[in-house]
């Protein structure tokens, strides 16, 4: 294990902190996919459970897609930090809006 840690390099922080952040991101992704899977199973029970589908979509936008954008945009694109921030914040707003619409949509 120590040999693997010695092979990593991190800019601006200790490798152990960078690895911990990466592990937490992976755990966050796995948990959000597990919860979304549970919500999708509830949706499949019948047409009266359509709110579960929209909750799953909102959750995936808020967690999974958001985390992929936070890691993927700076890693695989050359867009600037302002554009990255706008895309990530936009995804966050859409995810939150979807969840709020699911919860309060009938009363709005």
Image (cartoon, rainbow, N blue to C red):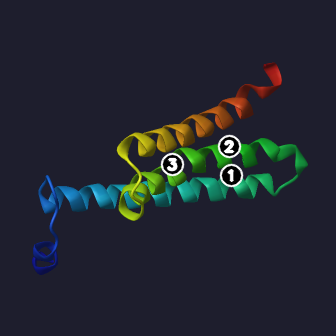
Quadrant showing the N terminus: bottom left
Residue 63 versus residue 23 in the image, above or below? above
Point out the residue furthest to the right here.
Answer: 47
**In the image shown, does 3 or 52 lie closer to the viewer?**
3
Query: How far apart are the two marked residues, 3 and 1, measured between alpha carbons?
Result: 14 Å
Mark 3 surroundings: few (<14), some (14-19) or many (≥20) residues within 10 A:
many
Residue 84 appears at what percent x and percent y?
Answer: 43, 46
Residue 21 versus residue 96 in the image, above or below? below
Instruction: List the residue tagged with mark 1.
Output: 39
Q: Which mark is residue 55?
A: 2
Residue 50 versus residue 38 in the image, above or below? above
Residue 17 appears at what percent x and percent y?
Answer: 18, 55
Q: Earlier in the sequence, mark 2 or mark 1?
A: 1
Query: How far apart are the two marked residues, 2 and 3, measured between alpha carbons?
Result: 12 Å
Q: Earlier in the sequence, mark 3 or mark 1?
A: 1
Q: Residue at x 78, y 19 (%)?
A: 108
Instruction: List the residue tagged with mark 3.
Output: 63
Q: Left or right: where does residue 99 sit relative to residue 49?
A: left
Residue at disc 2, secondary structure: helix
Q: Residue at x 58, y 53 (%)?
A: 35
Question: Do labels 2 and 1 touch, CB within 8 Å?
Answer: yes
Q: Residue at x 68, y 43 (%)?
A: 55
Q: Earlier in the sequence, mark 2 or mark 3?
A: 2
């Amino acid at each position: 294990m120590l040999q693997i840690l010695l092979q990593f390099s991190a800019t601006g922080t200790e490798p152990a902190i960078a690895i911990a952040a990466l592990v937490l991101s992976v755990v966050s992704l796995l948990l959000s996919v597990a919860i979304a899977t549970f919500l999708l199973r509830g949706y499949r029970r019948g047409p009266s459970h359509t709110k579960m589908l929209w909750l799953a979509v909102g959750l995936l936008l808020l967690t999974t897609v958001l985390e992929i954008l936070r890691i993927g945009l700076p890693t695989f694109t050359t867009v600037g930090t302002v554009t990255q921030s706008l895309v990530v914040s936009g995804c966050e707003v859409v995810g939150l809006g979807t969840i709020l619409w699911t919860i309060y949509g009938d009363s709005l």
